[in-house]
Image (cartoon, helix red, strand yellow):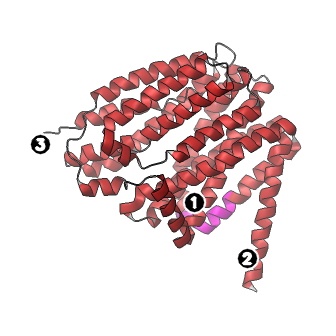
Amino acid sequence: MKFKYRRNIRCSYSYSLLAFLGITSLWVIYLQQQGLSLVEIGWCESIFHLTSFLFEVPSGLLADRFSYRANLFASRLMAILSAALLLLSHDFWLDVISFVISALSYNLQSGTLEALLYDSLKLDQQSKRYPRVISWTNVIIEFADASGIVLAGLFVHWHFGLVYVIEILVSSLALVSVGLLKEPSQRTTEDRAAQSVDLGLWQLLQLSWQTLRDLPLLRNLMIFQALFDSFCTTYYFYFQSLMDSQHFAGWLISTLLAISAMINMAVMKAAPWLQQKVSKRQLVLWLSLALTGLLLLNWLGKMTIYLLVFLLANGLTSLNEPIFSSYYNDLIDSTQRATLLSVANLLFSLVMIILFPLTGWLLEKLSFAVTFGLYGSCLLLILLAIFKSAVASKR
């Protein structure tokens, strides 16, 4: 048998390595060094998620209209433009435009590579290889992200703008990988349905509401993960401002991020075992208690505590990602999987739109310890209220 699309697999691996290099992940430190306040940084991230929310349509919709290759090509061009704007900008509104373009780049790329791989394997009658191929793709993405973050730490106090020069270069190389891809010549109706449903934002919102209303277990899991990941992500990014204000050396930042990456990979390996041993209810309870306890530790105001919370909170996010993804796939019908999974992304974006600028404002008015200690106290009160309600309902 002649495999017409075999090259797409190799090209997708090189594209993943280049497109997902986490070289710009320390953008909070960069913007602080450019003179932005924490409130302005909070608004940049909030606008990123607002843009992503407004343009959150299944990747199949754009891919069907513009082709997979065109989507990936446009995504990398926007990544280049976004990096160039941040590199040249010394103005808040130009930074905002850069974040808007970055969000559009993310939207164009989201799900497109996976869909191209699926169609390529399908047309070569190799669809059984898809789980293995996508698994390797995810490994490469995780490696690229971690490597980029560690490398970025070395530039923090030495020509930090070079990270955006590197981003422009690797995105340009990713364009070469896109150029070597071969667009699948046929896409069946069944395949499209399995990948996505052609819905606009309004239809997606309606489906989201119907899903959250009619499937209480799925609704509760999605809401929990959106809140959990939002608190962990907010801590991860604003911890960068603390590292900058405390004048962490570049090698120390890189070492810390390398340790974090190793913890993340270790807990991801442990996720399948934990999923077999612990029920959904127990997992949600223990994750809630763990996050609440970590945030409460911030009241102590010690740098060693901040470091511990940073490492463990980031690890918890990496732990629940594969577990909750598995839960969702078990609960969602295959014909609506891509669409309903986007509901979880919408919820996360909605929480981040509010939480991120709020945290920046609180950090300006209060302190790191008080801000995240208050978050921990609020979560503790919510858990106590839920526990009290559960005990009352059993009587």
Between marks 2 and 3, how big is the CA–CA gap?
60 Å
Of labels 1 and 2, earlier in sequence is 1
In the rendered view, tell whether residue 197 sits above or below residue 354.
below
For the residues carrying marks 1 and 3, which lies nearer the camera in this image?
A: 1
Badge 1 is on which residue? 222
Q: Amino acid at mark 2?
A: Ala
Magenta-highlighted residues: 276-287
**x, y (%) of residue 196?**
37, 54
In the rendered view, tell whether residue 43 sits above or below residue 267.
above
Badge 2 is on which residue? 390
Report the disc number at residue 1: 3
**x, y (%) of residue 169?**
46, 18
Between marks 1 and 2, how big is the CA–CA gap?
20 Å
Q: Decide if residue 89 is on the left or right side of residue 187.
A: right
**x, y (%) of residue 22?**
54, 30
Snapshot quadrant of residue 254:
top right
